[in-house]
Image: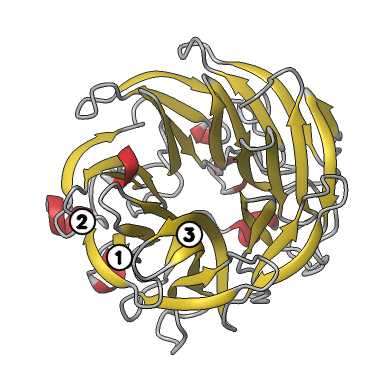
Amino acid sequence: MGGHDLGSAAGQLTSGTHRVRDDGFLVLGHSDLGGGGLNADVWAHRKYAYVGVWSGTCPATGVKVADFHNLRHPRLVSVLQNDEGTSAEDVVVRRVHTPSFSGDVAVTGIQVCGDVDEPIFRGLQFFDVTDPRHPTELGRWEAPEFSVGCHEVDLVQRPDGQVLAGCANVFAEQINGTDEVVLVDATDPTEPTTAGGWAIGADLGIDPATTDENLGCFPASFNHSVRFVDQGMSVYGSYWDFGAVLLDIADPSAPVYVSRADVAPPDEDGDVHSVVRAGGTLLVNLEDFSPVEGCPEFNGWGEVHLFDVSAPAAPELLGTFSTPNSRSERDDGFYSVHNTEVAKGTQAFSSWYSDGIVWWDYADPTDPVQRGQFVPPGAPDPEGIFPPVPIVWGVYIDRDRNLVLASDINSGLWILRPVGLGNF
């Protein structure tokens, strides 16, 4: 559970033709990750890729770990296993050094697939992946009772040595009155503990269920994602219709509200899904599914909004970027942006569902331009939820090898190299 219900939206798609594209990219390798489908987000660390598993029919097949030392032939080598009845969509891996642990730690976000009152673990799982072929579970942080669990996650070691994990516990404030931006101290990953948290109701006095900020086809204010910045001294929460919220977490036990990047207006549907900050620019991904949710009046699919955040307390909108398909009402696929990462300078790469991976340049943030696009071939969904169309969920920038990794819900892992970009 997170933002849009992809499974329900899939039932609204019409049939169409999807052209495979590799404009501006070399396609170096591919793995179907065992062929089970329902692939979610992607991360990479030391020549191993980590790909999460979506909920859907809730197969609980775990985060797949693929060795891509050989770029042409990435191989599935292990799994970070989640419990039955849960999904593990998002994963982040970092090398950390603390008195309790030194090595590579993976954190996965665990959500319950069914009713929130089911007696199933949800929260964060921590794994030792120093040897990715033989991962071992280190510890767990359990979300408050009746929570959905951690949708998107992040992990950072701060200059003071503290290791913080971030959890977006979606709709928690409305379900059980608890925080939705959750900070977990994982300095000892065998015993993670709650460090602090934040929510718009408890901390700003704004009722997320009734605020006038709720608008569009999916009117809601909840935290969908977390992203650490400033070496873990600040964090962004992606608060759907309320906007991208910046918090000062110098003291994690007492987050301080700094500002929000509000996308409405000019956007009429909100849906702040996730963010990435590069220098003084904040890129805000809006996951708008209006064309397949019965809301044509909201004019197309989701796009990226760019903000000047050189003054963190006063973000200013600079411009937007979208693809031709996302500006349309096309309904034979999903044509919204999902996630975005910046490789170097102003070179951005976005996972754009049925538009694949989109490479774009925001050197002029008032008028960004598209530089390339990779759209994989459609593949059947073994679980029968999605049609055989490209549905690229995740994107990761591998600076060690100047690569872009993509995860497709149906077809798996793709390894790409942008042509002409040079070293990241």
Instruction: Please name the residue shown 46% across and 14% down the image.
Output: 365
Which quadrant of the rendered structure holds the C terminus?
Answer: top right
Q: Is residue 417 visible?
A: yes
> Dot 1: what SS?
strand
Q: Nearer the viewer, mark 3 or mark 2?
A: 2
| Residue type (three-letter) at the residue carrying disc 2 | Pro
Instruction: Please name the residue shown 17% across and 44% down the image.
Output: 257
First in sequence, mark 3 or 2: give its number.
3
> Dot 2: what SS?
loop
Residue ID for mark 2: 252
Q: Nearer the viewer, mark 1 or mark 3?
A: 1
Q: CA distance from mark 1 to mark 3?
A: 23 Å
**Mark 1 surroundings: few (<14), some (14-19) or many (≥20) residues within 10 A:** many
| Residue type (three-letter) at the residue carrying disc 1 | Asp
| Dots 1, 3 in contact, CB < 8 A | no
| Residue type (three-letter) at the residue carrying disc 3 | Gly
User: Where does residue 63 sit, x and y in percent of width and height?
Assistant: 64, 66
Instruction: Please name the residue shown 82% across and 54% down the image.
Output: 74
Q: CA distance from mark 3 to mark 2?
A: 24 Å
Kindly identify which numbered label has been placed on residue 185.
Answer: 1
First in sequence, mark 1 or 3: give its number.
3
From the viewer's perspective, is 402 left or right of 184?
Answer: right
350 shown above or below 124: above
Quadrant in the picture for residue 56: bottom right
**Mark 3 surroundings: few (<14), some (14-19) or many (≥20) residues within 10 A:** many
Q: Return the residue nearer the eye: 164 or 211.
A: 164
Residue ID for mark 3: 2
First in sequence, mark 2 or 1: give its number.
1
Q: Return the residue nearer the eye: 332 or 345.
A: 345
Q: Return the residue nearer the eye: 381 or 247.
A: 247
